[in-house]
Amino acid sequence: MTQTEKTVPQRVIVVGAGPVGLVAAASLAREGIPVTILEKSRDLPKDLRASTFHSPTMDMLEPFGVMPGLIEKGLVCQHWQFRDREEGVIATYDLGLLEGATNYPYRLQCEQWKLTEALRDILEASDSTELLYNLRATGVTQDDDGVTLTVQHDDGSVEEMKAAYVIACDGAHSALRKALDVPFEGMTIPEIFLSMSTTFDFGAAIPDLTPIAYLTDPQEWAVLLRTPSLWRVLLPTDPNMSEEQIKDPALMEKRLQALCPKEGPYDVVHATAYRVHQRVAKSYVAGRVFLAGDSAHLNNPLGGMGMNGGVHDAVNLVGKLAKIWRGESGLELMQLYDAQRRKACIDTVQSQSIRNRRMMAETDPEARKAYHAELREVVADPEKHRAFVMRSSMIQSLRDVEALEEA
């Protein structure tokens, strides 16, 4: 029986309409592959999650035509820095050194929902795609010919949907990863992270502050991120505190004033407290079902690699799946996807985000002194400086995993 004669619908189902899911769907559409996207919410989520786009991510998004709009709505940041809450600037990194390795030698600060809305516009204009809301994938079975999803509607009713392949982009609590019984190995970071968004302009108040700054401190490290409309502050918090205690307005005000004293109270527009995990799926491939983004890996946000790594997953995955779809390769090609993207996650995203957290929270005076000396040494040497931003911008990790394909 030929592929077209099979009863399995010749389409791919993407579960989850976040940035990773919609990049996967848009990539499939560009390859001429019919795709159905399932989203559990009533509309695209419009939250204040990821906001940093690294250079290679923007290179990958360029073919969709979304970059001019994102740049217009975002904030171009050529420099970012490590600081100490007492000493001030430790090292400022120049992403202009990436010139020649990317079309975007900078970071773009732009809320992720601006990307998903732009991609939805593209997908809605395609005859081969459909985006369905209020549907939650709860189970999965498969055979040699296709995949059957168990899907639950808002009213509790259940139906089955069939596809040739499924891409699971259903997040950290992925029902599909659990249904496939794929181990999610790693750890939960002890402290809770508190993220606060405020209209206060830290750039005008703190000398030489770049729009992206990581502040080391033995008592309380911090991250300052400027978005197009707000500044975001990230602080570690005692895990023994309740969410109500953590988000107590008086305590948040006290912590913000300790970070940057100012006259009058801070205007905190939004605050959220959350636990952070460092986890990687044992395999990104389970037959005809493929994991990408948070369903495949989680890491702390220090370095802005989570969403970016997920987009890299999606592009890599679809590039290989398209070859399988066209009959140019067998399903075993997806094992290369697994090898490449797990390597990138473990060797770069996990190790670098863990190192960033360790360095920022270091309490030993000699270790802190050594970290700071190393950072200063890197920016003082042009070759080391460029190598560092190649790694921190995720360009080098992509080059490293490409070598697996050549081997």
Image: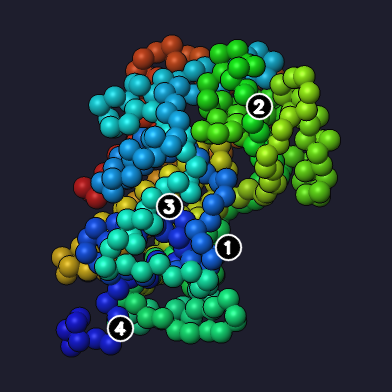
Residue located 56% across and 46% down the image? 49
Mark toward the start of the polypeptide (2 vs 1):
1
Q: Are marks 2 and 4 in contact (CB under 8 Å)?
A: no
Which residue is the site of mark 2? Answer: 200
Query: Quick one: 149 or 354, which is closer to the camera?
Result: 149
Instruction: Please state which amino acid type lies under the numbered disc 1.
Output: His
Q: Is residue 192 left or right of residue 78?
A: right
Q: Which mark is residue 380?
A: none
Circle 3 is placed at which residue position?
Answer: 117
Disc nearer the start of the sequence (3/4): 4
Which residue does the image show at 38% across and 35% down from the upper left? 71
Between 154 and 6, the residue placed more toward the observer is 154
326 lies left or right of 186:
left
Q: Position of residue 235 (x, y in %)?
A: 69, 35
Q: Secondary structure at mark 4?
A: loop
Residue bearing the label numbered 1: 173
Amino acid type at mark 2: Phe
